[in-house]
Image (spheres, helix red, strand yellow):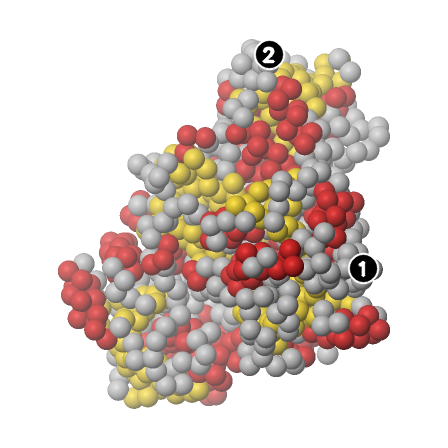
Amino acid sequence: MKFSVIVFPGSNCDEDAYHAAKDVLGEQAEYVWHKDTDLKGADVVILPGGFAHGDYLRTGAMARFSPVMREVEAFARRGGPVLGICNGFQILLEAGLLPGAMLRNRGLKFLCEHVHLRVEQTDTPFTSACRKGQLLRLPIAHGEGNYFAEPDVIARLESNRQVIFRYTDAAGDVVDSANPNGSAAAIAGLCNEARNVVGLMPHPERACESILGSADGLVIFESVLQWLKSGARGGSKGPALQTV
Amino acid sequence: MIDSHVLERHGLKRDEYDRIVAFLGREPNLTELGIFSVMWSEHCSYKSSRVHLRTLPTEGPQVLQGPGENAGAVDIGGGLAAIFKIESHNHPSFIEPYQGAATGVGGIIRDIFTMGARPIALLNSLRFGSLDAPGTRRVLEGVVAGIAGYGNSIGIPTVGGEIAFEPCYAGNPLVNVFCLGIAPAVDIIKGVASGVGNAVYYVGAKTGRDGIHGATMASAEFDDKSAEKRPAVQVGDPFMEKLLLEACLEVMKSDALVGIQDMGAAGLTCSTSEMGSRGGAGVEIDVALVPQRETGMTPYEIMLSESQERMLLVVKRGREPEVERIFDKWDLHAVRIGEVTSDGRLRVKNHGTVVADIPNRALTDEAPLYHRPMSKPEYLKDAQTLDLAALASASPHALRDANAALLTLLASPTIATKRWAYRQYDHMVRTNTINLPGLGAGVVRIKGTERALAMSVDGNGRYCYLDPRLGAMLAVAEAARNVACTGARPLGATNCLNFGNPERPAIMWQFAQAVEGIGTACRALGVPITGGNVSLYNETDGSAIYPTPVIGIVGLLEHADRVISGRFKESGDVVVLLGEGRGELGASEYLKLVYDQVRGMPPALDLDRERALQQLVVRLAEDRLIRSADDCSDGGIAVTLAESCFDTGGMGVEISIDSTAISTDQPLSDAAALFGESASRIVVSVAPDDVTRVLEIAAAANVPARVIGETGGNRLRMATGGRMTIDMATDDAERLWSTAIDSHFAKKIA
């Protein structure tokens, strides 16, 4: 399977996502420059972490206008699996591929540490190999990961089961003290209505080898491989991407 | 008209001016005077320090690049080089903490990728006034946020460092930043200009009026007018630097470059003259071609600007289009501003008219060199005296209990966890970090190999204040020991020398003593100095900081998966002390916190023993015979043992050590055993089956080693001379240690 990792000027986790796909999982991986207009035959598209365009103006605000984003949108509309990690998640929000917005962390400081996530839904390409309720210990590293959406949007996300990951404590309970950034409904990751586009603030690509302190992120990548191999994409003739 | 007022504003002395006239054979114009003033500033010329720095050991079979280039390099096997350097950004960080620290990080990163290396790790060594002193919080928060803002954005992990608090740094915080990169040894690129007619390119941010005379500012003391120097502090743009980093590394792969140098202190002036001087060539540029951010800039301003994120490149003839194409891809514009000449001069034109014409060597190799007068400071005789009897009678009652003293130490900002700071740094990006911050030296694996690199930056201003030579030796020993405690063999060193005004003989004596100590220790421990930086004039209103040499050491782990940290791993492991405590209380954190005294002699250091100890711990880690290793430093063995229990989920330890009869006062003798900071000690934990083997190997290595207890339970229990003197729940101690800095901030907000 081929992972295409989009490289924006200012991306800085592009090599990490590439390493996870290529060296850890042994799959094919390609970098796709943001000015490119084809995805190099991607089976999976990853929007990596970093500070695209310096995150000047607003996180992800300028990256959405990069030429490659038209291809990413078309790929998503065709049902292709797209994963946005950290800054990649912020770009997906700005591009309207996922609903909501990011505010500064409630502590107003950048935070880099391991947190616990609970997998809320397993019917997405990136959680299909997880158990519902499975706890993952993954690192976060962001200054603006405080997810915000209007209450009616949150309600719709909940009723559509689009909340994929929530911050919890080590026991798997959603408690305010375990919410690192103040995200609404402790949301750490989301999918779109068609369920093929997933964004999350924590970094699964940083937790794919035990020498790094956690290998809990592997299951995210294994999920999409399993999902692709099982032909789930071909079988899912769901509606084209709807307004989210 | 150049009069004494003009000279004073340029930080030049009359005799220096006379030398300028002699070099030129005429009076300089103002542009030339400006160029001389920055190149002859202490910051760029090392005019007070060079005679001493020459005595440092800089050679060894592993050294690929010693001092003199943008950074040093050591061979780490497999055809790879580790390229690293430490640099200070003290003065700017006091005036504008966020930007001062941020641009310090930006500068040291440029020094590394200028050498052709991919930067993979950052460290920082920070010193501030007392945490509860007015102003400290502003500077601390700004500096940490600035380091985070730059490093996180550019995507280089900050994998470790140190933060210390002492009143002497209140008006002169120290911000020393270290960066390490990796490159194939054959691909190291140097800052040379050569090949007559080769094009000189300018790449990166446009030139503005920011930072003009930054180098001169960093070469003067502070007073109450310092805030007015704000325009001399630069503003950082990590996104621009990220583009430059990627574009330059791509250009370097192409083999089209002759040389490259960043524009740091003294900007375009320093890069053109140094590159020309190193290449034995001249450089001619036209400042009218330099991209400018502001209108109406004069040649003087353009040459002296310290705008950040700019590089100067010399490109092989005929390869220009290739280089321009790569920069275009990154939306950077490489502008040809001049060419290499044969006459060894820096010639600056403005729209074709010569505005400066100076022999390069006058600016670099032949810059002034001073043998400044030195004299032993008068404070030392008294300060080095420690009267134990007086101490015993002056004991504050509450802290005569070792439990209370340990809790006081664990809650002191210098010893308490610095999680508040390092969680603001992205320490995991690039997925190489295998020892997280707070666990001793930072360790990054090298992808595509079995290897990893460990690195640590250490200093102890209090030790150096009380004995600069010994204190500097102890700093080298501690940095190397911290590296060894991960299982890595120390390979090379870089130093950042932070001192007061060198024109004072007492300060110059401290400097010379410290350099001598560094040289002695580096020779004995086999870690040559490959580069570094000197920061003088760290004084405010005539009051100097403690002499503070900070040492960065890099070491190699042959097997990344054999890395160890300072944390205990398993209950029931045997705790072994390598080395011996001698009950030395002088210069200790304990003496400062409990008795409010900064006095006595720092701990003695036997470098042969230190070397044997470090080699032993590396061997034991390599053989997988130890599960953790942590050295004894601030707060002595009691603090080491407590910290080894922290972040383990509340594991306890029970140990018994001898009391050191330094006084007839029992509590003081107990304190000396528990909190004395004797050097050359490492606490290791060992699986029970391996203890005999560990003790045998230690004996063969001639390193004292003895079983002092075992891990387990959930309490910290320490006996001295057979009596239990410390007994507390690990959780209680850890709570204090882990919240000390956070709760300080919480308290202030309320």
Q: Quadrant of residue B256?
A: top right
In the rendered image, residue B545, in percent from the top left (x then y), is placed at 55, 55
**Residue A159 vertical position relative to residue A238 in the rendered view, above or below:** below
- Does residue B485 appear in the picture of this structure? yes
- Does residue B97 appear in the picture of this structure? no
In the rendered image, residue B34, in percent from the top left (x then y), is placed at 69, 28
SS under mark 2: loop
**Residue B128 vertical position relative to residue A3 in the rendered view, above or below:** below
Camera-side residue: B104 or B390?
Answer: B104
Camera-side residue: B121 or B146?
Answer: B121
Residue lying at 27% horizontally and 71% vertically, measured from the top left? B686
Residue lying at 46% horizontally and 59% vertically, measured from the top left? A209
Question: Same chain for the residues at labels 1 and 2, yes or no?
Answer: no
**Residue A85 vertical position relative to residue B683 in the rendered view, above or below:** above
Residue contact at pointers 1 and 2, CB within 8 angstroms: no
Q: Residues within 10 Å of mark 2 (few under 14, many from 20)?
A: some
Amino acid at the residue labelled 2: Gly
User: B79 left or right of B499?
Assistant: left
Chain of the residue where label 2 is placed in the rendered structure: B
Q: Quadrant of residue A227?
A: bottom right
Q: Which residue is mark 2?
A: B197
In the rendered image, residue B404, in percent from the top left (x then y), is placed at 46, 85
User: B45 left or right of B516?
Assistant: right
Tag on residue A242?
Answer: 1
Q: Quadrant of the N terminus of chain B?
A: top right
Q: CA distance from mark 1 to mark 2?
A: 61 Å
Chain of the residue where label 1 is placed in the rendered structure: A
Residue lying at 54% horizontally and 37% vertically, measured from the top left? B113
Q: Quadrant of the C terminus of chain B?
A: bottom right
Amino acid at the residue labelled 1: Gln
In the rendered image, residue B413, in percent from the top left (x then y), is placed at 54, 70
